[in-house]
Structure formats: C-alpha cells, structure tokens
Amino acid sequence: MKRKKRNFNRRALARGGYLAAITAMAVALVIVVNLIARQLPSHLKEFDLTDNQLYEITDTSREFLAGLDQDVEIVVLAKEGATDQRILKFLDEYAALSSHITVTEVDPVAHPAQAAAYDADSNSLVVICEATGKTDVISYNDIITYSYDSYYYMSEDSFDAEGQLTSALDYVTNDTNKVVYTVTGHGEEELSSIITDAIDKANFSLSSVSPALNGGVPEDCDLLLVNGPATDLSESELSLLLDYLDGGGQMVLLLPSEYAELPNWNALMEHYGLTMAEGYIADTANYYPQLGSAFAICATLDLTDPITSEFNHDTLTLLTNSLGFTQTAETPEGVTVTPFMSTTSDGLAVTLDGGQTAGTFLLGAISERTDSADSETVGRLTVFGSTSFISQDILAANPSIANQTIFMNALTAGFDDVSNLSIPAKSLAITYNTIANPGMWSTLYMIVLPVLILLFGLIFWMRRRKR
C-alpha cells in the first residue's frame, strides 16, 4: 500500500514538474515574442482602422517613392512630445516605403544651435536633398488644418500629410519648375483655394496675365489657364492667343457658368476642332436626382484617355449648369480631338427660351495641333464644360468625386517631365452612424423590431409558465 502511494506521488510529482516546465517555456516564449515585437517598426505591427484610412498611402505616392533614387532627410523640428502622434505614425509608414528616406528628430529647446541650422520654425517638417541642395518646409498647420463654425468653434478639418510630403519630396529632388498663368481681363472667376493648393502641391508656380495689357503671353509661360470668361476676346487678343497656341503653347479653358455669346472664344475653339453648343447641358440618363435637376450631371468618362484611365465606369463626377461643346463638322488639318468626358446619348442642350437639342455633348476634351512636317505637337487646348467642375462648393461638399484629380491630370498631361503628384487631403470631419433617407427603416427599427421582441418574450414566458 505504501509502495503504491509512493509510486503515485512520484507520478504526480513528475506530472507537476512537466506542467511547470511547459508553463515556464510558454511564459519564456511569450516574453521573447513580446521583446521581438517591440523592436519591430510600427508599420509592421499596427493596422489602419481609422475613419477615411488616414495612414493609407495612395498608389501615386507608392510609385513615386519606388522610383526615388536620391537620398532625402526629413527632419522633425519640434519639442519632444509636441508632435501629433498621427503625424509621427504617418511619417513612419511613409518612410518605410523607401530606403532613400531617413527621419531625424531635432528638439529646438534641447538643441537650439542644431535647430537654428535648418532656418525653419518649430513644429514643422524640414525636407532636405543634399544632391540638389534644395530644402522645403512643411508646417504642422499645413498637415492638420482647422475650420471655424458659425459660433467660432475650431474643429479639425483635414489631414494632408501624404499630399504635403509627396509634394515636398518631388520639389527637392526635381529641377523642373513649370509656370502656370491665369488669364485675366474677361471677368474670369477666381480659382478656389482647393485648386490653388493642389497646383501648389504639384510644384507649379502660379501667376496671372492680361494678354491685352502685356501684349501677349510671357515667355516663361508653360500653360495658360482660363477659368470661365464672362466677356469675349477682342480680335487682337484672339490673334495673340492663337499665336501662343500655334507656337507650341498649352491652354486649359473652363467655359463660364452662365451662357453668353462669345464668338471669339468660340473661334479659338473652332481653330482646334471644337465648337460651343447653344444653351445649358442636361443629361436625363446620368444625373443626380437628389439635387433636383437633370442639369446636375455625372459625366461619362472615356477610360482610354490618360487623364481618366485610372478611374472606372462607377467613378463619380459632378458638373452643374454646365455648357457643352461638340467637334466641328470638319476637323481642321493637323488637329486631333480626344474627348475624355461627355454626356450619354440622352444629353440635351437647353436654351433660355426653352429650345432643346438632343445628342451627346462633350464636357471635357483635348485638342492637339501637330506639325505636318515632323508630326510634333505644336499646340494643345484642353476644354472643360463648366467652372463648376472645380468650384469650392462642389469640391468641399463632395470629397469622394474625381473632379480635382481629373483637373490636375489635365494640367500635367501635356508635360513629359511632370506627373500629377497633387494628392487631396483626407477629411477629419466626424462621421456619424446614421442612415440617409431613413423612411421605412426608421419604422422597422423603432416600431416593428421592438414589438416583435416583446411578442417573442411574452410567448417564451407563457410557455415556461405552463411547464
């Protein structure tokens, strides 16, 4: 009996020792795994679960960083602990995509002499490329922007880390500097701040010119931008602009938001194989019914054109009270017209007196004139149907539409050494878990479901009571 008890104790002790050893090994393994995990960079052990995917990096930036062949240093110039963690997190994700990017943190309080060498204010990112000798500074206020409501309450508006960083890296590693001139003198509309910011992020210099007062187009002009002329060109201005275009210039023309007779602007378009339609354009097959009008058009995109090839047939755009145009009956010699946005075949041109013309109307097109001798492009005209395509109200209220990207693609498409690296900011506006147009869903959730749950509970209670 004693022997059996002794054997049992030995087996229990052996089993206990075995379990203790397994437990110790498991604890050791957990500790080792945690120690290794702590050494991993955050981009390998964290996942982006934020609204609007704040840390998700677009294919545009990924392709740019994959082709980066010059070393760039990004200096975080801020007091320790003063940098928003979202900026640091994104910077870690961004720098991990290229071995040519290094990130350095400099505390201007702890190391004032070192910070002074960067010639930049605190709370900023300093982007430096030694190979080109160029530097760019990004203020934190340009990365996280704020807005005020009617009660002057300040709230976060947008997060623009990717757009600012990609623009800065492109600037410091690239010697290309294009100049865009906006045409004035014909009641043109001001460009929205969203578009001027996008042009700035594309590293274009922006200025203005009056062809009549300047006697032509400045020699350093790489592209003319005409945003909704309300009055017509003079004959001399028409001649100046045609000389510029036929001499190898580029122009982007957005037709005005209100219909007017503009024979000389139309003559310029006809010289490039396009002619304005009379009246406002509606599309009864592809519009936004919630806006209450067939004049609020979602354009049909031609996905074969480089300007729109990155999108698909479900991509949303918006033009309101747009004018339209068509190709001339006979295309001028040496001119090639390439539409990239249009109505469906259910388009209508509606005049102020109620007249209607049915058909497919162009809302965006490129027209190029080539030299017959060597087939080189000597002039490029891009036309959009409406200034509403880049208006502040539409872009700010509809961040998911493709208007801004298409417009910036059009601005950069005519240059071999420039690509559209202007990336829109991500919204930081609070999103609510609400159902749009609730209707019967409210009835279902607030009345039908509660009643069904009560009935089910009552039946279950009565059955149990009878047992």
Image: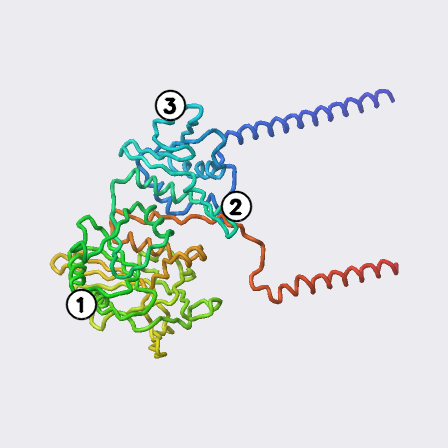
Furthest residue in direction left, as rendered: 373
In-front residue for pair 199/66:
199
Q: Please tell me which residue lies in front, 316 or 137.
A: 137
Residue 415 at x, y percent in the picture: 25, 50
The answer to the question of whether label 1 and label 2 lie on touching residues, with beta carbons closer than 8 A, is no
Q: Residue 301, located in which quarter of the rendered image? A: bottom left
Amino acid type indicated by mark 2: Thr
Q: Amino acid at mark 3?
A: Ala
Where residue 41 sits in the image (x, y, percent)? Answer: 48, 33
Give the residue at x 32% y 54%.
Answer: 409
Q: What residue is shown at x 27% (from left), y 58% (from top)?
A: 226
Distance from the alpha carbon under mark 3 to that under mark 2: 38 Å
Q: Residue at image x 50%, y 29%?
A: 39
Q: Which of the two marks, 3 or 2, is nearer to us in this view?
A: 3
Q: Which mark is residue 113?
A: 3
Residue at 87% of width from left, 22% of height from top? 1
Closer to the N terminus: mark 1 or mark 2?
2
